[in-house]
Image (spheres, rainbow, N blue to C red):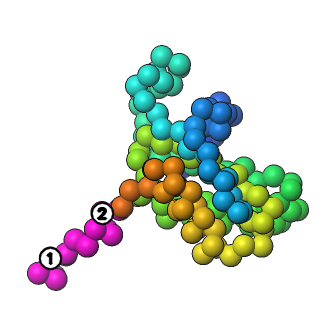
Amino acid sequence: MLPEPYRLHHRADFSRTVRRGQRIGRRDLVVHAFTHTYDDVADGDSLVRVGGPRFGLIVSKAVGNAVVRHRVARRLRHMCAQVIDELPADTDVVIRALPGAATADSVELLRQLRAGLRKLGLQRVPAAALGRTTAGER
């Protein structure tokens, strides 16, 4: 499950991310990303950000009926939770599911999401993946 501070809720946040951010298309997903700067404060954005990157999902009726759309959205929220540590904290990401997302498996969707984020230059290596040793391994 994706914790509350990491979710986009307001229409204005979705619109800003889709219209002003970068976009990359994959086979089953379109990834929109917008990184906030101090210049955005003049546009009405607040300086205070709680948590890390925020995610929003767009799963339209083209993906399938309500049951299929909710299943796709749950899978995408789970994937967003997996990549939170890999993104800068001042980033908003909107993921638009394309019709193929209904039949794609979770591993493939996660691969497409990570590839899109990497192509946009947003994904960084999490601290856990840097090969740091724990106290018991020394």
Q: Is residue 23 above or below residue 47?
A: below
Helix, strand or loop under label 2: helix
Q: Position of residue 118 (x, y in %)?
A: 48, 57
Q: Nearer the viewer, residue 49 or 111?
A: 111
Q: Position of residue 55 (x, y in %)?
A: 57, 49
Q: Check the image and name the residue furthest to the left.
A: 138
Label 1 environment density (alpha carbons within 10 Å; few <14, some 14–19, many ≥20) = few
Q: Nearer the viewer, residue 125 or 26?
A: 26
Q: Is residue 35 above or below residue 95?
A: above
Which mark identifies residue 106? Answer: none
- Asked if the magenta segment contains residue 40, the reply would be no
Helix, strand or loop under label 1: helix
| Residue at image coords 42%, 30% | 37
Mark 1 belongs to which amino acid?
Ala
First to last magenta residue range: 126-138
Q: Please report whichever mark, 2 or 1, sits nearer to the chain's N-terminal start.
A: 2
| Residue at image coords 77%, 73% | 103
Q: Where does label 1 land, which residue?
A: 135
| Residue at image coords 40%, 25% | 38
Label 2 environment density (alpha carbons within 10 Å; few <14, some 14–19, many ≥20) = few
Q: Where does label 2 land, which residue?
A: 127
Kindly tell me whether residue 35 is visible in this rendering: yes
- Is residue 103 rendered to the left or right of residue 137? right
Mark 2 belongs to which amino acid?
Ala
Kindly tell me whether residue 2 is visible in this rendering: no
- Is residue 109 rendered to the left or right of residue 84? right
Number of disc labels: 2
